[in-house]
Image (tube, helix red, strand yellow):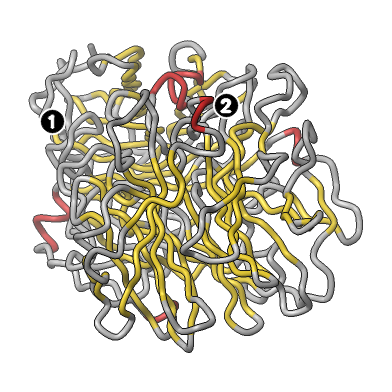
Amino acid sequence: MKSYRWLPVGLCVIFAIVACGSEPQPSVHPGNFAEHALKVNWFEYQGQDEVFEQPLAAGEYQNPILSGFYPDPSITRAGDSFYLVTSSFAYTPGIPIFRSTDLVNWEPLGHVLTRTSQLDMTGKGVSRGIYASTIRYHDGTFYVISTDVDGIGNFIVTSKNPAEGWSDPILLPEVQGIDPSMFFDDDGRVYITHNGAPDEQPRYNGHRAIWIWELDLGTMKVLPDSGRVIVNGGVDISQEPIWIEGPHLYKVDGWYYLMCAEGGTSQDHSEVIFRSRKLTEPFVPAADNPILTQRDLPADREHPIATAGHADLVQTASGEWWAVFLATRNYDKTFFNTGRETFLLPVSWEKGWPRITAPAAEIPYHVTAPSGLPRTQDAVPLTGNFTQRDYFTDGELGYAWSTLRSNNRGWLQPGDDGGVLLKALPEGLDGRNQPAFIGRRQQHQDFTAKLNMDLPENEGVLGGLALFQNDTAHFFLAVKKSGTYYRVVLEKASQGPVDVVSSKVFPVKPTRRITLEVVSKDNKLSFYYQPEGDARELIGRAHDARVLSTQWAGGFVGTQVGIHARTAESILPSGG
């Protein structure tokens, strides 16, 4: 565990995640658990974004369709239902999966990777692990193909019913690189496309290629020596395009279309398209690529949507084409804390080529919804402004909650009368082991999050509310008992060691509960505490929210808001 500028104490909270096919967790002796645990009675998240305040007109939907850290979307249709997956990186369970009948409202089905035999993120950085996945449905079976970076590499898992669990990974050692996709041709042959190194010495930084392999569906093995490059560099290698990736193949009206992301997943991100009459012939780029981008628009426009790319296409039963893709909602021109989100737009076909946005067109927040599709049953709010309060009364955590790195959740436990317990662990938020942390995505630039918890009686427990982007970018508002006082501290990590930036004390009283709160408003973060029966108090000053932005923190994820518990290395002086 890394050293802190003050000597912290651990807190203890417990939780269990709902995930299809999840494995049993090790039991913890109740007495020992309660002694070192903090009880959280409820957790509330409220979104307050100005851009979501404008009401939708009849027949419109809200972009993004999945707000917060839901990047690299892939979509498929099975009968009258659509299924969508996104990246999860080092969070567990892995690969969120959703179902919809109208493409707009989505029902969470849980996660694809829920067992240690499928997923082991031990020791990985937050932005490593599970990169972009592709979901496909063929002949009664669902397939998800993905990459475990710094782990098992590329793999496939299968399911007959995505809500009831997935197979263990089938490894693809021949397939290197990232962003694999599957294509089922109408002649029965199956192919894998992916991003990889070029088959020549790279000509420049960011020079990548798109590869294709044939897969034997019976043995689930790649055919030896079938791999070859089908796009070298990008649309025009003489212009030194960077990071060609996210390839998907489709067959439409006798043409094979290859759609890829190009430009890197930041402000120059885009989506480009190629086509060929045969898979054995060269893929020719469209003359008016890219077919989706926001890179040519002014960064100072109001409520900018940026970094658009990494798309996937789906066709409805009536023949309409739609695209899901990632993009970000920026503030202060280029900053975003909410991560890369999932958007939806209709696809038009012009002279045999698909197009998602017209050149220089802004991605709209309000869009006319797909026609003739039945409304999704059991959908939950995943966009717009909403308030969600979780009392943890079901004995297990819902779809929104994640942990870091390990599927071991023996430190989580439901409370006897509701609420959740986290058993304090030595690991802090700045380490590479699993901390006692549960988080849900920050889905709004302006939001309020708060939790109500029992004041810890054990002086070796430090716990409370955390905002976590990665191990070098986070805040932790926590409480511990110290003799005849309780101490409230605010820890901050900003590309350096963890500091205690604010601290307050209040005397031990008969009250047993406290509410901790963070308010994000106008790119500032303010933290509050309120012992039961007392007034709400601000701790310290407001902090720059950009500390938790991808631009400052780096990586590919968004901020998580949640609960953290940590053991103390020593006890703070009483009343100090």
Rendered position, 297 above or below 101:
above
Side of 234 where 257 appears, left or right: right
Read off the residue under disc 2. 267
Write down the quadrant of residue 219 in the picture: bottom left
Location of mark 1 (residue): 568
Query: Which residue is drawn at the image coordinates 60% and 72% (left, top)?
Result: 82
Q: Residue at x 29, y 86 (%)?
A: 218
Where does the C terminus fall, quadrant-wise? Answer: top left
Residue 63 left/right relative to 358 = left
The residue lying toward the viewer, choosing from 229 and 171, is 229
Contact between marks 2 and 1 (CB within 8 A): the answer is no
Amino acid type assigned to the residue bearing label 2 in the image: Gln
Name the residue type under label 1. Ala
Q: Is residue 181 visible?
A: yes
Q: What secondary structure is marked by label 2?
A: loop
- Tell me how far mark 2 sits from mark 1, CA to CA: 42 Å
Give the residue drawn at x 50%, y 59%: 281
Residue furthest toward the front?
281
Among the 4 quarters of the image, the one containing residue 331: top right
From this view, report whether residue 341 is shown above or below residue 170: above
Q: Nearer the viewer, residue 576 or 274?
A: 274
Q: Residue at x 33, y 73 (%)?
A: 215
Residue 159: where, in percent of width, then height?
38, 80
Position of the N terminus by quadrant: top left
**Residue 301 at x, y percent in the picture:** 76, 21
Q: Earlier in the sequence, mark 2 or mark 1?
A: 2
Q: Secondary structure at mark 1?
A: loop
Which image quadrant is residue 96 in?
bottom left
Task: Give the percent coordinates (x, y) of residue 230.
Answer: 44, 52
